[in-house]
C-alpha cells in the first residue's frame, strides 16, 4: 500500500502564494518521477509541474516562472511553491508519484482557490 497525503491548499488572493506538500508513505521502495496536476470541474486535467528522480524539472506553460517544484527524497515528499497566483490557477491539485517499475499513485487532491 502507498498513500499520498497532500496539504497546503486554501484560499488566497490574486498575487499571493501557497506551498503545497505531498508526503508518500507505505510500501515505497523506489520512486522515480513526481509531479503535480490540476483540474476544475468540467475541464481537462493539466500538468502543472514534473520532477525526475535526478531533480530535473518541467512546467506547464501557464505556470512557468511562477511555480517551483521540489522534492525531499529522504522524506518521500514533493512540494509545489506557487507564487503570483492568478484566478485561473484555481482548481484541485493532485500530486502523483511513479515508481521505478512504472506503477503510479495519486493523492486525494487539495483545493486551491484564488480570488480577485
Image: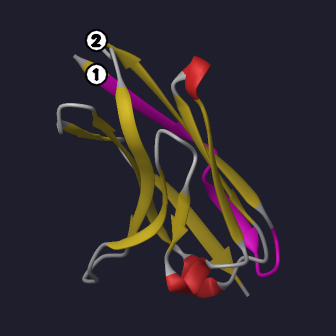
Which residue shows up at 74% across the image and 67% down it?
Answer: 12
Which residue shows up at 28% across the image and 83% down it?
Answer: 43
User: Looking at the rendering, in which quadrant would you find the N terminus?
Assistant: top left
On screen, 33 above or below 87?
Answer: above
Measured in 3D between alpha carbons, the distance from the residue under mark 1 to the one under mark 2, in whole angstroms, is 6 Å
Residue 31 at x, y percent in the picture: 37, 30
Mark 1 Cα shell of 10 Å, populated few (<14), some (14-19), many (≥20):
some
Mark 2 Cα shell of 10 Å, populated few (<14), some (14-19), many (≥20):
few
How many numbered markers are drawn? 2
Circle 2 sits on which residue? Answer: 27
Residue 8 at x, y percent in the picture: 64, 45
Residue 75 at x, y percent in the picture: 58, 20
> Would residue 8 be counted in the magenta stretch?
yes
- Mark 1 and mark 2 in contact? Answer it, CB < 8 Å: yes
Residue 42 at x, y percent in the picture: 25, 83
Q: What label does residue 72 carry, if any?
A: none
Q: Nearer the viewer, residue 49 or 94?
A: 49
Q: How is the image coloured?
A: secondary structure
Which residue shows up at 17% across the image and 36% down it?
Answer: 103
Over which residues does the magenta segment extend?
A: 3-16
Q: Main secondary structure of the magenta part?
A: strand
Q: Secondary structure at mark 1?
A: strand
On screen, 68 above or below 79?
Answer: below
> Residue 79, located in which quarter of the rendered image?
top right
Q: Is residue 30 left or right of residue 69?
A: left
Q: Is residue 15 left or right of residue 107?
A: right
> Would residue 45 be counted in the magenta stretch?
no
Circle 1 sits on which residue? Answer: 2
Q: Secondary structure at mark 2?
A: loop
N-term-proximal mark, 1 vs 2: 1
User: Looking at the rendering, in which quadrant would you find the C terminus?
Assistant: bottom right
Amino acid at each position: 500500500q502507498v498513500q499520498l497525503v497532500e496539504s497546503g491548499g486554501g484560499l488566497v488572493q490574486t498575487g499571493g502564494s501557497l506551498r503545497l506538500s505531498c508526503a508518500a508513505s507505505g510500501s515505497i521502495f523506489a520512486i522515480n518521477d513526481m509531479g503535480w496536476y490540476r483540474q476544475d470541474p468540467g475541464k481537462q486535467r493539466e500538468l502543472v509541474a514534473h520532477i525526475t528522480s535526478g531533480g530535473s524539472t518541467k512546467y506547464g506553460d501557464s505556470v512557468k516562472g511562477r511555480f517551483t517544484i521540489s522534492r525531499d527524497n529522504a522524506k518521500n515528499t514533493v512540494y509545489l511553491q506557487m507564487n503570483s497566483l492568478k484566478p485561473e490557477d484555481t482548481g484541485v491539485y493532485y500530486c502523483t508519484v511513479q515508481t521505478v517499475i512504472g506503477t503510479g499513485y495519486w493523492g486525494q487532491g487539495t483545493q486551491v482557490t484564488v480570488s480577485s
